[in-house]
Image (cartoon, rainbow, N blue to C red):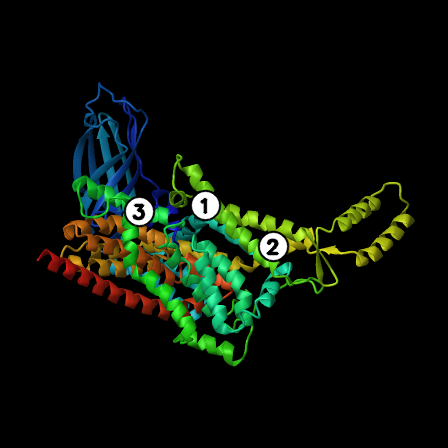
Amino acid sequence: MFSKRFAIAFGWLAAAHPCTADNLTVPNVIGTNTSAYEVSVESISVTDVATGLADIAAIHNGRAFNVIANLAWEQDIYDLDSTNTLLWEMFINGELEDKGEVNLMSNRALPATLEAGTATFDKSGTYTIKVKISLDTVEEENDRDYESFAAGASFVPLVMVIVFAATTKMVELSLGMGIFVGACMVAGTLVGGFRTMLDVYLLDALADKDHGYVFLFILFMAGLVGLIEKAGGLSGITHALKKYVNTSRSAQGASFFCGIIIFFDDYANTLVAGASMRPLTDMCIVSREKLAFIVDATAAPIASIVPISSWVGFEISLIQAELDVILASDPNPEIATSGFAVFMETIQYRYYCIFMLIFMPLLIISGRDFGPMLISERLVKVYGRTDGGPGGAVAADGQAIVSHNAPKPDTPCKWWNMAFPILALVGYIFYLLIWTGQQAGVGGESFIELIEISNAYQALLWGTMAAALTALLFFFIQDKKDGRIIWFNVNGYINKMRRFFDRHRGDCRRGQEEGMVALEEEEEEEHARVLIDYREAMSSFLIGMEKIFGALVALTLAWATGAIMQAVGLNRFFGEILQNPALDPGMLPTITFIIAILIAFSTGTSWGTMTIMFPLVLVPSYNASGGDPVIFYGVTAGILAGAVAGDHASPISDTTILASMASECQILQHVRTQAPYALMVAIWSVLGELLCVKIITLAQFLERK
């Protein structure tokens, strides 16, 4: 899922990463100022008329837009000696396009924005929009350049990503080319596109606070896995489960079950399930592609429909915002009037999530893989490979990843050295979700409400670091000797402290010190040693972080690519389709589901898709269907399920990349092998949507008769 969450951080659309005047042009601000008022045109933005999306970065030919001038006032009160009449003119390429006036006294406060007319560009090219204002003796103006192109051209960056990914098999190069091409389209020049790609899109992707949370969470999680590996936990859990999980089918089933248990957050689900199940599936000859698919497919589908998860609060807030608009015009609707009640009603219509959670166990039990996944599974089974097969992640030089973090030969590999840290991680995250919900609430919230209003970013970050520190302490209280673990070796601790102080006595002669050191080395071999010392712990933590550097680069590029897709207006292209008044209301749930898939696939974010779709579709679909509850719930479910489906299949989704990273699978291999499965379940969902809505609508019609 690109996320899913990260779309909130960029405020959507090109709005998140507009090519501002500061980035692309030198503002042309002139004027005289002898009036009591001091006002200037601080910046110019445009809003798409059809979709209502604000501050768009590029304009589509033939699509109307509103020009917005952002005003900066030096005072907060009216000047009674002034005419208080603000005159404005809007020019396009130096020609007057529109003009008007605003009576300042008609508003309670001085306006921060000014609507400076509506315009349309018929041809592709660069256009300069200028807004000039006059107030008494004050005259100010500002301008900004915009690129206009055909709406269909907004597909070009996406096509570039797909073509380069298919031909070069390099996800970083593919995403980078998509960003560059999109930036050039928005900037209008190669030089401007190159500069904007670096200064705006990539830099903003790194500078976003929520993205910083995700970066640190991933790094700490990778460090925790490194600690567990060094302590022998990964090998220990594999050996312990050998007698219970010893076939490919049982290993896949265990991975699916692990994903279902961690239902409260998709990020935690992906990273914990992938890292903990990888040694087990490798031992049972399961391809890394299959593990990545199971991990990815049990993340968002389960988190998005369970009423107790980090998703619910966000989904409900979007639903409630549109419900408030509906209730303002229709105080007594037939639909539920609370966001949570609507959320619960939509679960039965979220066919993609339901079908995917049914499809996976059926696939595991039957063993009937198909498409590229079948090839990947046969490659590991025919050759009996226990390294995940050729789809496993590779190092920067293209070679297989070699672990430099294996436990020492004398380290006992025990299952609890993985089970305890993972349980601690899950416990910390779940507790912190509740705690952050309590901090955000006003008191008296129910358990479900606390989860809804929790801060998932903070819970994941704090919980992961707390689990790493807890694991470290847990390893420090274990000593190893002769292949066994000694718990709370108090005598050993006392002896170590005595030897430490003896070593640092200031009155010891050099010869005595050397003799003491030799004696200590002899004694050290006879005594138990700590499972991993602090030097090994720090080294393994950093090695764990090092492994996921390439995935973090891909994740950053994916965020920037999602912003580019919005900047060129791909989401507006799909949004305008849903605004067509000729659509049959009965088809709205299905069409909404398909459009949501396309937007989520193009932008790589499920949460961002929801943010776009709800204001575009929900209220118009309610009005078009005459308030029909089935259509309303179906459209709402179509948005929620379609966002998950498109995000699941997208090569630029953050959850796609995280699933690959946690499973140590090549990103493009993961995308390629899971795409047929996601497509098949999506087709089932479309058929189910059509059939169900038609049946229920027919039943309601017969009931009225």
Q: Is residue 411 left or right of residue 305?
A: right
Distance from label 2 to label 1 (Cα)?
A: 27 Å
Q: Amino acid at mark 2?
A: Leu
Q: Nearer the viewer, mark 3 or mark 2?
A: 3
Toward the top, the furthest residue is 81
Q: Amino acid at mark 3?
A: Phe
- Mark nearer the N terminus (2 vs 1): 1
Would you name the residue on which mark 1 appears?
433
Indicate the quadrant containing the C terminus: top left, top right, bottom left or bottom right: bottom left
Would you name the residue on which mark 3 appears?
340
Q: Position of residue 618 (x, y in %)?
A: 23, 50
Q: Is residue 76 above or below residue 50?
A: above
Would you name the residue on which mark 2 appears?
542
In depth, the one of 224 and 548 nearer the eye is 224
Distance from label 3 to label 2 (Cα)?
A: 43 Å
Badge 2 crowding class, 10 Å Cα cut-off, few under 14, some 14 to 19, many 20 or more, is some
Can the viewer see residue 17 in this picture?
A: no
| Residue at 48% in and 64% down | 255
Q: Amino acid at mark 1?
A: Leu
Q: Is residue 221 left or right of residue 475?
A: left
Q: Position of residue 386 (x, y in %)?
A: 56, 73
Q: Position of residue 620 (x, y in %)?
A: 19, 50
Indicate the quadrant containing the N terminus: top left, top right, bottom left or bottom right: bottom left
Q: Position of residue 311 (x, y in %)?
A: 38, 50
Q: Nearer the viewer, mark 2 or mark 1?
A: 1
Q: Is residue 665 above or below residue 426?
A: below
Distance from label 3 to label 1 (Cα)?
A: 19 Å
Judged from the image, the secondary structure of the residue bearing numbered disc 3 is: helix
| Residue at 40% in and 42% down | 450
In depth, the one of 379 and 333 nearer the eye is 333
Judged from the image, the secondary structure of the residue bearing numbered disc 2 is: helix
| Residue at 60% in and 49% down | 470
